[in-house]
Every structure is written in structure tokens, then in C-alpha cells.
Amino acid sequence: MVTSARARRGTRARHRPGRSRRIYRHRITPALRATLAETEHDALPEGGHETGIIEWVDYRKTAELPVFPPVGPALTALSDPRATVTDAALPAVTDENYTWL
């Protein structure tokens, strides 16, 4: 059952040039950041949980982090964290270019 008027009309939401997309509506201000989680709990294979501390870092330092998929170098290359990306494709992840943990 279709409930929204837009869906009933068969139209899709489109990005309007010059306007921010919804995902960028809120900037991470200190007040907003204070409401977000400061720790995460990862399940361990033998049971229990490991607590990790969430640390905010500048996007230009992400190339140094062991993040999968390895998006760090692509983020570091951006001129601004909200820069337009025309090609979001990343290189293939192989044993030669990624250290598996």
C-alpha cells in the first residue's frame, strides 16, 4: 500500500542545485556531538563485549586509519568534507594494497 502523496503521483525527490542534501542539514556542533555516543561495544567471539572509545578526527587524517573499506585516501583528497564527488568508485581492495586485520 502506497501512503505518501509523492509516491501516489509517481514522482521522485530530486536534488535541487544550490541546496544542501538532507544528510548535510545538520553540522556536527559541540552541542550536537555531546548528545552522540562516546563508546561502542563490540561482541567478542568467546562471549562478552569489548568497549571502544569513539574519537572524532579531522577527515584529512582518515588515510592513516585502518578503516574498511579503505576510504581514507579518498576522503583525505577532498578539498572540504562536503565537497561534491563526481566519481565515488574506489580502487579494488587486494592483498597487495590492504593489510587485513
Image (cartoon, rainbow, N blue to C red):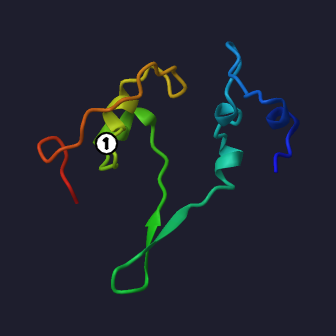
- Can you tell which quarter of the image residue 88 is in? top left
Q: Residues within 10 Å of mark 1 (few under 14, many from 20)?
A: some
Q: Is residue 9 left or right of residue 46?
A: right
> Percent from the top left, x then y, of residue 6?
83, 33
Seen in the picture, residue 29 relative to 88 is either above or below; the reply is: below
> Percent from the top left, x then y, of residue 20?
68, 24
The residue lying at 65 percent from left, 36 percent from top is: 23
Q: Is residue 65 left or right of residue 9?
A: left
> Percent from the top left, x then y, of residue 78?
42, 23
The residue lying at 36 percent from left, 24 percent from top is: 77
Instruction: Return the residue nearer the eye: 70 or 65.
Output: 70
The residue lying at 68 percent from left, 21 percent from top is: 15
- Can you tell which quarter of the image residue 42 is in? bottom left
Picture mark count: 1
Instruction: Return the residue nearer the eye: 92 or 53.
Output: 92
Q: Is residue 81 left or right of residue 24?
A: left
The residue lying at 84 percent from left, 36 percent from top is: 8
Q: Amino acid at mark 1?
A: Pro
Element under disc 1: loop
Q: Report which residue position mark 1 lands on.
A: 70
> Percent from the top left, x then y, of residue 18?
69, 13
* Position of the C terminus by quadrant: bottom left
